[in-house]
Image (spheres, rainbow, N blue to C red):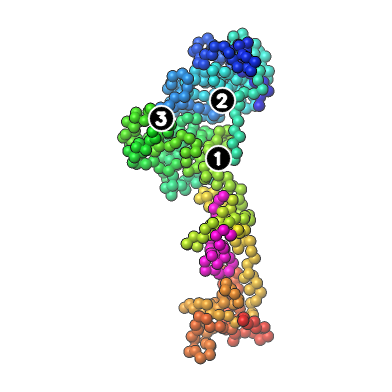
Amino acid sequence: MLPYVYRITKYDPADRDERGYYTGVVEAVSDHGPVEAAYLEAVAAFAEDTGVRHLAVREPQAALGFVHFGLEPALEGGGLAGLFPSDLTGFHDGAQVPVPVGLELVRAMLRDSGAWCRLEVEDTFAVHVGWDQYVYVGSNVPCEAALARTRELGLFPEPLDASPYEAVFDEPGEQRPADDVFWARVRWCVATREAALLEEMHVDNASRWHRLGDGTLDAVRARLAPRARLALWPDLSTDVAAVLAGLPDEGLVEFVWEDQAGLITSTVADETEFTALAAKVSGARAAAVLPTDVDGRSPLFTAVLPDADGVLRARWRTEPTPSDRDWAFLKTLRRGQAVNGAVTEIASFGVTFVDIGGFTAMINIPELSWRPIGHPRDVVAVGQQITTEILDVDLVRERVSLSVKGLQEDPMLQIVQQVGRTVTGEVTKIVPFGVFVRIEDRADGFEGLLHNSELAQPPAGRPEGTVRVGDRLTVMITEVDPTRRRISLSHTRSCRPGVEEHHHA
C-alpha cells in the first residue's frame, strides 16, 4: 500500500456534509474539455514528481458486444480506438505503456465509454479512475509540487489512507497456472474429445474463442495474450435451431457461435437483443448458450497464464471448477504418502474406489493384498475405512493410484525362510505343465507349482501320473521368488535327509 494517496476531483470539499457525502451538483460524465484536460495534467504532474515514465496496465476491462456498460455512448473498441488495434493487442494485464498513453487511458476512463484498468508501478505509483469523475493517485513520495499544480488547475486533492480501487484478491484457494502440466491436460482432453474449445479472457467483459485440435494447440497457445485467463470447454452444438429455441424468456446470457468460416464469436445479450441475435447467427454451423452467472457457467477447467519466467503475477483469478479444486488437492499428494479414506465403490471389473478427502482414487486388484484373492470383496467392503499408500499421482489424467499392500509386510518373505521344508497341502489347480499346491493352511494361502516331472508317484489307488483337485500331497519348498510371485515345489522323494517335515492339518 502506498503511503501518499489522494482523491482528486472537480468537487469542492466545502460542498460535503458531515458524513463526507457531496451535496453539490454532480456531473457524472466528462466535459471532453478543460476539466478533463485538468485531470490529465494533474495525473501527469504526480507521475513526474514520482519519477515514473511507464505504467503497467492491470486488470483491464472493455465492454464489447451487444451490451454496453459505460455511462457515455459505446465507442469502437470500448473507447480504445487509436490507442490499441481492434483486437486490443497490447491492452492486457501487465502491459507497459508510456505515461502519455497512460494519460489517454485515463481520458477513456473519464469518458466512461466501456474501458477501464488500473495503472500502476509496483510499490511506487498508481492511478485509479472511479465513478463520477473521482480519480485516485498514489505515490511513494509526497508530491508537493503536483499537489500545488492540481490546486492551480481548479481541482481538489484530498488525502486518503488508501484508494477504494486498491486491488484486493482474497478469494480462498490457489490459482491454477497455465503451466506445462495444464497444457498437457488440455492436450489429453482434446485427444480424448472431452474438450474442443479454449476461451481466452484477455480483458474483463470480453473473450476470444479458439478451436483446438491435435495440430492447432501449439499455434493457439503461442498467440494468447499475456496473463490471460483461460477456460476449456466442450464442443458447441451443431443444432443451432435448438440452441436458439432454448434461450430464456428474460435475463442476460452469453451466446457463443461458430460461423461457416470457422470464426468463433461470443457476446452478452438480454431478451431485447435476442431477435437481432437470432438473425445474426441463423447461418452459424454451431452454437451454445452460457449463463452469465458464475454458478451457472461450467467450463471443464480453468487457469491463468504465468509470465515467461513461469511466475504467476496476474492478480485476477478464474472461478474454480471441480477439476481446479482437484488439481489443488492432487498437488499436495506425493508418492509413498500414506492416506486414509473410505471405500465408495467396488466396480464390476474389480477396481476399488476410495474417497481420500473429496477426491476419488482407485486401487487395482493386485494392490489390495500380497496374497492371492478372487475378488476385492474378499478384502474390503463399501464404507470401510482403510489406510493406503499413494503409488502415483497423475495430474494430466487426474488420477491417483493407491495400494493397500504397500503399507504391509510381504508375507512371502516368511516363505523364503522355509525353503527346504516339506509341507502337506491341497491341490488347488491342474495345468498342462503341473499342479498347484496350497502350502499354507488358510483359504488365501500361497500356492506353489509342482511340475509334471514330480508326479511320477500318484496317490494310492490311482493310475500313475493322475492327480485331482482336492488331493493332498506332501511336497518340499525348493525355491521362492517374491518379485515374480513364484514358489517352486518338488515331491518329497527329493527331500534331503534330516530336514524337518511340516504337515498341515
Q: Which mark is residue 270?
A: 3
Residue that badge 1 annotates: 177
- Between disc 2 and disc 3, the foreground one is 3
Question: Can residue 309 be seen in the rendering of this structure?
Answer: no
Q: Label 1 crowding class (10 Å Cα cut-off): few <14, some 14-19, many 20+?
A: many
Across and down, in percent, residue 234 comes to: 43, 43
Which residue in the protein does label 2 denote?
A: 118
The quarter of the rendered structure image containing the N terminus is top right
Q: Against 248, is 428 above or below? A: below
The residue at the point 55 percent across, 41 percent down is 176
Q: Determine whether the residue tagged by mark 3 lies in a helix, strand or loop.
A: loop
Specify start and end residues of the magenta stretch as a single range: 358-384
Amino acid type of the residue that numbered disc 3 sits on in the rendered structure: Asp
Which type of secondary structure does the marked residue at label 2 adopt? strand
Could you tell which of marks 1 and 3 lies nearer the N-terminus?
Answer: 1
Separation (CA) of disc 1 from disc 3: 33 Å
Three-letter code, disc 2: Arg
Residue at 53% x, 90% y: name it. 460
Q: Picture coordinates of residue 37 (x, y %)? A: 54, 12
